[in-house]
Amino acid sequence: MGWGFAGPFVAVFGLVLLAPIGYALYLSLFKDRLIGGTSFVGLENYGEALADTRFWEGLARVGLFLLVQVPVMLGVALLVALAIDSGRLYGRTFFRVAVFLPYAVPAVVASLIWGFMYGTRFGLVGNINDALGVTLPDPLSPSLVLASIGNIVTWEFVGYNMLIFYSALKVVPRSLYEAAAIDGAGEWRVIASVKLPAIRSSLVIATIFSIIGSFQLFNEPSILQKLAPNAITSDFTPNLYTYSLSFAGQQHNYAATVAIVMGVITAVIAYTVQLRGMRKG
Amino acid sequence: MRMRTPVTRRLLGAVAVVSALALGATACGSGGTDDGSASAGPKDVAAALEKGGKVTVWAWEPTLKKVAEDFEKKYPKVDVELVNAGTGDKQYTALQNAIAAGSGAPDVAQIEYYALGQFAIGKSVENLAPYGADKLASGFTPGPWNAVHRDGAVDALPMDSGPMALFYNKKVFDQHGIAVPTTWDEYVEAARALHKADPKLFITNDTGDAGFATSLIWQAGGRPYKSKGTDVTVDFGDQGTRTYAGTWQKLLDEKLVAPISSWSDSWYKGLADGTVATLAIGAWMPASFVSGVAAASGDWRVAPLPQWTKGGTASAENGGSSLAVPKAAKNKELAYAFTEFATTGAGASTRVAAGAFPATRADLESPAFLDADFPYFGGQQANRIFADSARNVGADWSYLPFQVYANSVFNDTVGKAYVSSTTLTAGLNAWQETSVKYGKDQGFTVNK
Amino acid sequence: MTTPPVPAPAAAATPATSASDSTPSVSSSTTAASMTAPADRATTTGAPSAARSDPKRRRRSPRTPLSPRPSVPLTLVTALVLVYTLLPLAWLFINATKDQKGLMNSFGLWFADDVNLWDNITRTLTYDDGAFVRWLLNTLLYVAAGAGGATVLAVLGGYALAKFAFPGRRAVFAVVIGAVAVPGTALAVPTFLMFSRMGLTNTPWAVIIPSLISPFGLYLMWVFAAEAVPTELLEAARIDGSGELRTFFRIALPLLMPGTVTVLLFSMVATWNNYFLPLIMIKDPDWYPLTLGLNAWNAQAQTAGGEPVFDIVITGSLLTIVPIVAVFLLLQRYWQSGLAAGSVKE
């Protein structure tokens, strides 16, 4: 009976995700050349991917992104959620909605907006430079572009995560607060010993989402690439790399291989975080 | 994915008229052998038109809209569906996908000259010679014709071309008393003078564009790419390349070019307010000035492309595209009929009238074309300059049969020169290496 | 040019994990109180009085001893975040009031001399033979069929995972997570080739079918169903001889409503903003969703002779966001209760 209910999901899932992945696995065993056609190469593509510095550099870049951007985003989201939940804000509903709004903005539009803001000549950065007579560093220069992308991603998803945390906080039994308050615990103490432990599973979940999101970073760099073609290279992130392999280079076989390697790495890390996060406490 | 391509409506090199005609004649003689089907002759095209049907055209060229309407008017039984399936790379991706899938490919596709080789070598486009295309050779200017024509086959018909010229903002130049540069050395001088007069002014914008760089190398006499069948040579060590790199390096070192990507909104702003003072670009640009930089109407003028040697006349092509018939097309005769209609005769003239730059001799040489005033350029007869440029395009240029890939990694390699202490020469070497590696990987014989 | 490879799904999927070791059914510590909570939450919207006596209903009042008064400093500090989130949206709104010339010549974060918002909206709706309206309708179709279908599948699947023991159940989530971890860009071509063989490319199905999968929705419905639908209720129904389908529709579904609305909203945003797959699948502008259409207009500026219409693109972007924001505002009540239940477990 269970399969009866789960069946439709499983069937469509098989069609739109598993089948293409199976196809990609199959593709990864071949090599197709403009001259010479297709030949079976076994695991050769995997050997190549494991030794491919362009792939590993991209992976290192999203790894760095993950280590910096995710904590900042989740931290801000958590603080705002706690602030709204504390009941000590004026205009709580407004805050909740306004902070959430960016999530409704398509990534394409979000990158368009921020691309403008980052402009050192006609954009907001340029306006600030002119108005204050300063020279801010170019947000789209190679050294800063990763941070600038992190900012866009943070902007898009801070409200989304905030709402997940906020909703989790809302169902923490108030009796726990009361008990703590009677014990004389201050607000920070209540947060540390009551609220945070209570929403731990939400935190873990949000972290796992963000890990997958970081490893699949694509939209924002790909749109900004037009504005900063030299800072955002075609192998900037593993996902951009597979895209350019597949679309500019017609190297579908190798792109499939890189994607599968990437998928395995991402899944392993996600599982590890999940297991550790859930086990603690 | 990088969307520089639109900009880079690169054009294949021009070959001497004679050699083009000679090749055309050869194609004539061997016409039809490729398909082995004598049935696919001009007669079939006429019959197909009689019978009617539907032609799906993938193109982003705006002037085709009117042409499609005219075609339907002339052949009421034919229904032309014009689809903008993306610009440049995006459309090629879609086309490759449809070809690989074996269904969904259009009957006619716009393909830029630089990308055509990739489709031709993959045998994805129909040889149009048996349909009568080989007889059209003399109707096209040599550069574009050379670009669509190889090894006796006609892979596509030239739709437009982009002989280069220098567009400059006269108001800005006059205001600062700077003369219009006639050589690239003077260009560098002008860049310095402008920027010194007002640090907000830049001679031009450049963030690294494969089409632009290769065009300047072409004009300087460099021929980094050679290909014959599956034998390919990539060599950025020749004199022409060195000339280009040496001069352009000065502009980069002194930060004299604005770090603005072409076709962005900042670029349009820069062109409108004069902070981007010149553009060395293909002759198709005026239409974009009129529609995108309307505010600066009257400020701009056209001059011949600066020269690498004083008193020279050398030019190069920049951009331009063709119309091809994919092998996967359903109704090839009808597809060919539309292709010919849109690229020659009345169709070509309609498009020229709408602002496209012709690849047809008749249009290029017609007095009406040459004498046309451009109100946008203060009434200048700019087509005379473009036509001169078209005549002086350097011969024997060719792109790689995998130029789409090569261009996609231009900014990964040469781009470093724009944002770090890497030199252009080092960047070009890296570009060469990456291209060679890819070529070998794809089964070409490279640099042997 | 681009988009979420596997946007909401990708992001969403993972949470599922907890499932693999134990059914997420309210692991240990979640008390009886929370077992019943979703049920009354489901009913409270309509009849608040019914639940008045439930201690959880009074959630707000016990706050009083803890933190009664709104705090100005805290509001100001949080307002910084607000500025951050709203500033770019302000830019979008301000620039939607400018014409092409105003965009080129005026300061980005302030209005130009003349306000052209209404004129821009009219032009956006009529430009290109009214293509915007067509794309809007397409998008509505995709959202209705895709997000609606995704919700149905997720609800059924989540319910099954939470309330039935069947072989292979534990593997489901491991597989789902593994699958969404593979970068979507590399799967686009295989997917295209498959769909093309099935004759689905260039049809609405090519957008709708992939939208039917929301791994996050499945996760959410799993935890939600585990909590919101007491197993005893189902047992009782079965003893009364009710068939499984009937039990689902009569007993489970009403209890699942808040979670269902949640999943629906998430799927709607994902479908509304969907870009990458339609880009690959749809070449006929008549079937474009709004995101693709706007992007095509934006790309006009990159074509020689093409007409740059940044003003229309910006106004169109604003118009694209408005409906989805409106839906959020209208339904945020459900939205919170659904999510809350989903994250109750510890």
Image (cartoon, helix red, strand yellow):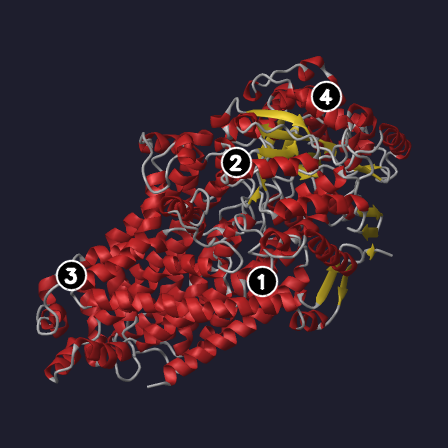
Label 4, label 2: how far apart the Cα atoms are: 39 Å
Residues at discs 2 and 1 in contact (Cβ within 8 Å): no
Label 2, label 1: how far apart the Cα atoms are: 59 Å
Pick whichever, B379 or B8, lies toward us: B379
Task: Name the residue rendered at 45%, 47% in the picture.
Answer: A119
**Quadrant assignment, res A5:** bottom left
Report which residue position mark 2 lands on: B197
Q: Which mark is residue C139?
A: none
Task: Name the residue rendered at 85%, 28% in the picture.
Answer: B17
Whether residue C301 appears in this view of the structure is: no
Three-letter residue code for mark 2:
Ala
Report the mark closest to the observer, 2 or 1: 2
Report the mark closest to the observer, 1 or 3: 3
Say what secondary structure mark 2 lies in: helix
Say what secondary structure mark 3 lies in: helix
Report which residue position mark 1 lands on: A20
Above or below: residue A89 compared with residue B149: below
Label 4, label 1: how far apart the Cα atoms are: 51 Å
Three-letter residue code for mark 3:
Val
The chain containing the residue under callout 4 comes to B
Report the mark closest to the observer, 4 or 1: 4
Whether residue C122 appears in this view of the structure is: yes
Report which residue position mark 4 lands on: B364
Residue C111: percent from left, percent from top: 32, 36
Same chain, labels 4 and 1: no
Task: Name the residue rendered at 46%, 58% in the picture.
Answer: A149
Same chain, labels 4 and 2: yes
Same chain, labels 2 and 1: no
Say what secondary structure mark 4 lies in: helix
Report which residue position mark 3 lands on: C72
